Amino acid sequence: MRILGLDVGDRTIGVAISDPLGFTAQGITTIRRKKEEQDIEKILEFCNEYQVETIISGLPKNMNGTIGEQAEKVQKFCAALSEHTDIEIKFWDERLTTMAAHRVMLEADMSRKKRKGLVDKIAATYILQGYLDSLSK
């Protein structure tokens, strides 16, 4: 059982995958967004390659728990993705995951340039790992 994690942004999509047993999340890549069709096609390639059964997309809620403009964009993208696949798509509250990703990279003393290229992949890993951890409870 593999689960794909997504951190959907305006310019990039961070992608992570679970191990076959669903215990750990590993970052795969960051997709540079082009056209929605191409973005969806790339995600579906990962789904086929890893035989994904579920997709977890981070939902960037406001700090008070409400759905804002960015969360609406993510929901719209996932609705378009769902039109191209039968794979179940679930949302996971991603508040503070990007900040946590930045903090880890700062602690690792990464340059700003390297951080910029990795932040979305690491955020997707945090999103997916949070979901996986919730399953084991």
Image: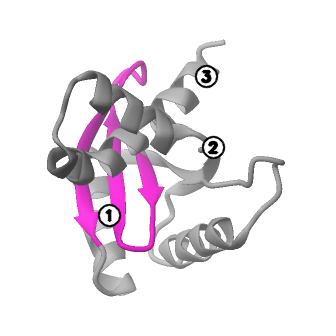
Alpha carbon of mark 2 to alpha carbon of mark 1: how far? 23 Å
- Which numbered disc, 3 or 1, marks the residue that appears first in the sequence? 1
Q: Closest to the observer: 48 or 91?
A: 91
Local secondary structure at mark 1: helix
Where does label 3 land, which residue? 135
Q: Amino acid at mark 2?
A: Arg
Q: Amino acid at mark 3?
A: Leu
- Which numbered disc, 2 or 1, marks the residue that appears first in the sequence? 1
Q: Residues within 10 Å of mark 2 (few under 14, many from 20)?
A: some
- Which numbered disc, 3 or 2, marks the residue that appears first in the sequence? 2
Q: Report whether 134 appears left or right of 35.
A: right
Instruction: Assess whether residue 18 is covered by the magenta stretch.
Output: yes
Q: Closest to the observer: 51 or 118?
A: 118
Q: From the top left corner, tell me how far across and down residue 7 is, in percent.
A: 45, 54
Q: Quadrant of the C terminus?
A: top right
Tell me the magenta residue range.
Answer: 5-32
Instruction: Assess whether residue 44 is covered by the magenta stretch.
Output: no
Q: Is residue 66 above or below residue 50?
A: below
Local secondary structure at mark 3: helix
Eye-nearest disc, 3 or 2: 2
Where does label 1 land, which residue? 43
Instruction: Decide whether the magenta segment is chiefly helix, strand or loop.
Output: strand
Which residue occupies 18% across, 34% down? 110
Q: Quadrant of the N terminus?
A: top left
Alpha carbon of mark 3 to alpha carbon of mark 2: how far? 19 Å
Which label number is shown at residue 95? 2
Eye-nearest disc, 2 or 1: 2
